[in-house]
């Protein structure tokens, strides 16, 4: 305590008349306010908006979550697919058009949050429009080409792209999509000209990977789980996965780092968010229920079956991660002239 402050406190001590007159009186809380119960929730059907087509990773995780919570709460949680705009159409509906009463949840994803904000100068959906409630799962980024593509490994493919960037076609839900940032980061690492490559817009992984399998695009960059069905059918092959560690679902596939490309950090995640203004008791109930859900063996098996790794984060940690990601992806998008 400073000298001046000490004098001031001494001069207006607890025994002085001045202290009695100026001291604030403690706020009085009525017994009714103190005992106010948390409203019942949910008491009716909840719409769980997936802003992508059915069959992709976000959709599959949302359906597994909806199934668990419907049984947990005794109320139906209905998954509604609203694809379009790189995830923006469904996100706008959930965050700006529906009432913020807890009965419209958004299956939030890296593509329609941090990447959308970074990829668009005036994003229709911003971080401040929503309450990031919980992250549920994450997925390793994988680079897939047609099964009979001529490249024997990722290093050879990367060298070909570096020399022939104008011949590379790759799929994405839009310029701010997960695939776009995965491709941009990879091309930056190998020194290839991103601006000379060509993006083919799709509705999501369930549309994107078949295009590569059919020879309509050269590269699809999605999660291991999203590519797995076409991989198992022998229609595509995965040349590498991102990150420093191999995917637990594809232990025989090398990482990009093993192929000489360091610094590939883009990864996929999905979770739940609500519109700003949604009551705290709703957010807390979802956060606590999902924390319990992640420990449920049956739910864990569902994630494993779709090749998604558990990645629970509570509201506070989720928000901090979103802030860091937004900064990184904005720098990458600016560097590659991706911001539109």
Image (cartoon, rainbow, N blue to C red):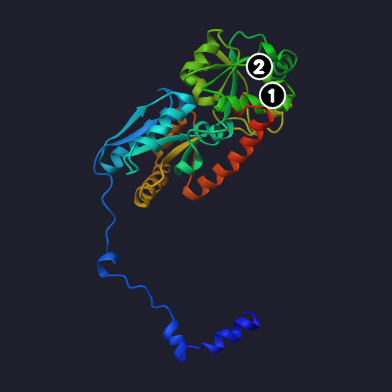
Q: Specify the quadrant of the image occupied by residue 172.
A: top right
The residue sitting at 28% across, 65% down in the picture is 33
The residue sitting at 75% across, 14% down in the picture is 163
Give the structural element (helix, strand or loop) at label 1.
helix
Viewed as shown, does residue 228 lie left or right of 51?
Answer: right
Percent position (x, y) of residue 95? 40, 38
The residue sitting at 66% across, 36% down in the picture is 331
Please name the residue that numbered disc 2 is placed on. Answer: 197
Q: Are marks 2 and 1 in contact (CB under 8 Å)?
A: yes
Percent position (x, y) of residue 113? 51, 36
Give the structural element (helix, strand or loop) at label 2.
loop
The residue sitting at 42% across, 22% down in the picture is 53
Q: How many marks?
A: 2
The answer to whether any part of residue 50 appears in the image is: yes
Q: Specify the quadrant of the image occupied by residue 222.
A: top right
Indicate which disc, 2 or 1, sits on the residue closer to the N terminus: 1
Along the line of sight, which residue is nearer the eye, 11 or 168? 11
Percent position (x, y) of residue 34? 30, 66
Q: Quadrant of the C terminus?
A: top right
Please name the residue that numbered disc 1 is placed on. Answer: 187
The answer to whether any part of residue 250 appears in the image is: no
Q: Specify the quadrant of the image occupied by residue 35.
A: bottom left
- Spatial distance from mark 2 to mark 1, Cα to Cα? 10 Å
Q: Give the vertical position of 299 relative to 155 (above or below).
A: below
Badge 1: residue crowd in 10 Å (few <14, some 14–19, many ≥20): many
């Amino acid at each position: 305590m400073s000298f001046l402050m000490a004098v001031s406190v001494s001069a207006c001590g607890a025994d002085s008349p001045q202290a009695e007159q100026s001291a604030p009186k403690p706020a009085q809380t009525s017994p009714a306010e103190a005992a106010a119960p948390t409203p019942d929730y949910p008491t009716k059907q909840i719409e769980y908006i997936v802003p992508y087509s059915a069959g992709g990773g976000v959709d599959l995780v949302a359906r597994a979550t909806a199934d668990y919570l419907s049984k947990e709460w005794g109320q139906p949680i209905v998954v509604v697919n609203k694809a379009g705009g790189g995830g923006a159409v469904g996100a706008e509906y959930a965050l700006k058009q529906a009432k913020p009463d807890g009965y419209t949840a958004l299956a939030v994803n890296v593509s329609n949050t941090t990447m959308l904000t970074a990829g668009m100068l005036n994003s229709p959906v911003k971080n401040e429009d929503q309450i990031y409630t919980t992250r549920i799962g994450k997925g390793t980024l994988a680079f897939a080409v047609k099964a009979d593509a001529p490249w024997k490994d990722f290093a050879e493919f990367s060298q070909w792209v570096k020399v022939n960037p104008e011949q590379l076609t790759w799929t994405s839900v839009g310029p701010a999509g997960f695939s776009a940032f995965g491709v941009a980061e990879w091309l930056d690492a190998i020194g290839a000209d991103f601006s000379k490559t060509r993006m083919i817009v799709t509705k999501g992984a369930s549309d994107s990977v078949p295009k590569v399998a059919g020879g309509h695009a050269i590269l699809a960059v999605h999660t291991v789980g999203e590519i797995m069905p076409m991989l198992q059918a022998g229609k595509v092959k995965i040349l590498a996965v991102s990150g420093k560690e191999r995917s637990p679902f594809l232990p025989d596939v090398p990482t990009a780092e093993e192929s000489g490309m360091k610094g590939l950090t883009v990864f996929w995640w999905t979770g739940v968010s609500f519109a700003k203004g949604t009551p705290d008791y709703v957010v807390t109930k979802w956060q606590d229920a999902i924390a319990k859900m992640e420990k449920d063996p049956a739910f864990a098996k569902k994630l494993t079956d779709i090749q998604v790794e558990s990645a629970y984060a509570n509201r506070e940690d989720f928000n901090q991660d979103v802030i860091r990601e937004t900064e990184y992806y904005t720098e990458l998008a600016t560097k590659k002239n991706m911001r539109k």
